[in-house]
Amino acid sequence: MSSSSATNYNKFDEPFARIYNETLGPSYNKIALPTLEKLLLPYIPEKANILDLCCGTGELSQWLLNKGYQVTGIDRSQRMLEYARHNAPNCKLILGDVRFFELLPTFHAVSSMGLGFNHIQSLSELTATFNNVYNALDSNGIFVFDLRLENVYSSTLNNRVLGDVKDDYAWAMKNIYHPESKECRVFVTTFQLRDIDCWKRLDTSFSLMSYSKDEVQSSLENVGFTEIIIYDIKLDLGLITEADMVCFVCRKPI
Ligand SMILES: C[S@@+](CC[C@H](N)C(=O)[O-])C[C@H]1O[C@@H](n2cnc3c(N)ncnc32)[C@H](O)[C@@H]1O
């Protein structure tokens, strides 16, 4: 498995992993867990074998494990996986890139929640990821993932600043959307207390890409997925989210 050379993920990982573990992950999972409860769990066997792509800090993997499923998580960030090893010690965790993974078709379900696929930088890479998912799914296996669409980045989230201040740590994150490239650049600044009155500042940034419903749907169809349904998390599932999200559900045919 390889990783992208386009972004320096080590620099990005260190502050983001802590922010994600303490703040962003728990807030995304308030949406992701009830979404899976409605759209995935009723349709898979007891003790199903589930692959959690872009598993991050492992909170969701552990939640699935607690429900009796067998869970394998993949993430390309060493730092995120260190948190995952602590949060989900009995899940199988793999350091790897979802654009390039190969696993035997043994999974009843593959999920990717918490907007992991918005981190994938092009439609062709997203399609390559879908292809890997298809190959890892058992026949009639189900694939569920959430995504933010373009309108969210260009409206609600553009120029939005998030942040928090703790005793030994402070962070701020700002989104800037570039409609011509469909890229939302996320700038992160952290301050870490190193000694009395000595704070270390670190600036980094990463990109989230926006995709349209139609291009994602065609890409899934081209790979071979069927029964594709797109749920609006607010309108169709009644969940309260700050920024609109959709969830795709589809199947590998028998
Ligand atoms: C927003 S977090 C979501 C974490 C987790 N799914 C959750 O719901 O808490 C996105 C994760 O995707 C991972 N990621 C992004 N691109 C990836 C890739 N190409 N392969 C593997 N992991 C990737 C990042 O390292 C990060 O941990």
Image: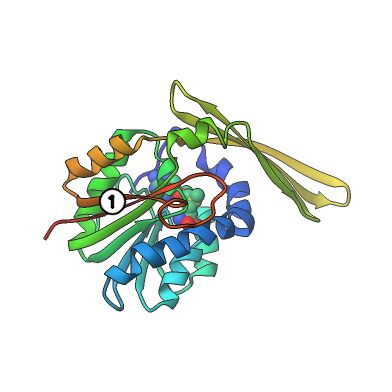
The residue labelled by disc 1 is 229
For the rendered model, the colour scheme is: rainbow
Place of residue 78 in the rendered image (x, y in percent of width and height, measured from the top left): 49, 54
The residue drawn where x is 28% and y is 68% is: 43
Relative height, residue 217 to residue 17 (above, below): above
Furthest residue in direction left, as rendered: 254
Relative height, residue 151 to residue 21 (above, below): above
The residue drawn where x is 43% and y is 24% is: 181
Left or right: where does residue 194 sit relative to residue 27?
A: right
Place of residue 110 in the rendered image (x, y in percent of width and height, measured from the top left): 31, 59
Dot 1, crowdedness within 10 Å: few (<14), some or many (≥20)? few
Q: Which quarter of the picture shows residue 123?
A: top left
Q: Which quarter of the picture shows residue 107?
A: bottom left
Q: Nearer the viewer, residue 47 or 246?
A: 246
Q: Which quarter of the rendering shows the C terminus?
A: bottom left
Residue 104 makes an appearance in the image: no
The residue drawn where x is 48% and y is 70% is: 88
User: Callout 1: helix, strand or loop?
Assistant: strand
Furthest residue in direction top, as rendered: 180
Residue 57 makes an appearance in the image: yes
Q: Nearer the viewer, residue 122 or 244?
A: 244
Q: Nearer the viewer, residue 182 or 17?
A: 182
Place of residue 19 in the rendered image (x, y in percent of width and height, measured from the top left): 63, 52
Relative height, residue 122 to residue 21 (above, below): above
Place of residue 59 in the rendered image (x, y in percent of width and height, measured from the top left): 51, 65
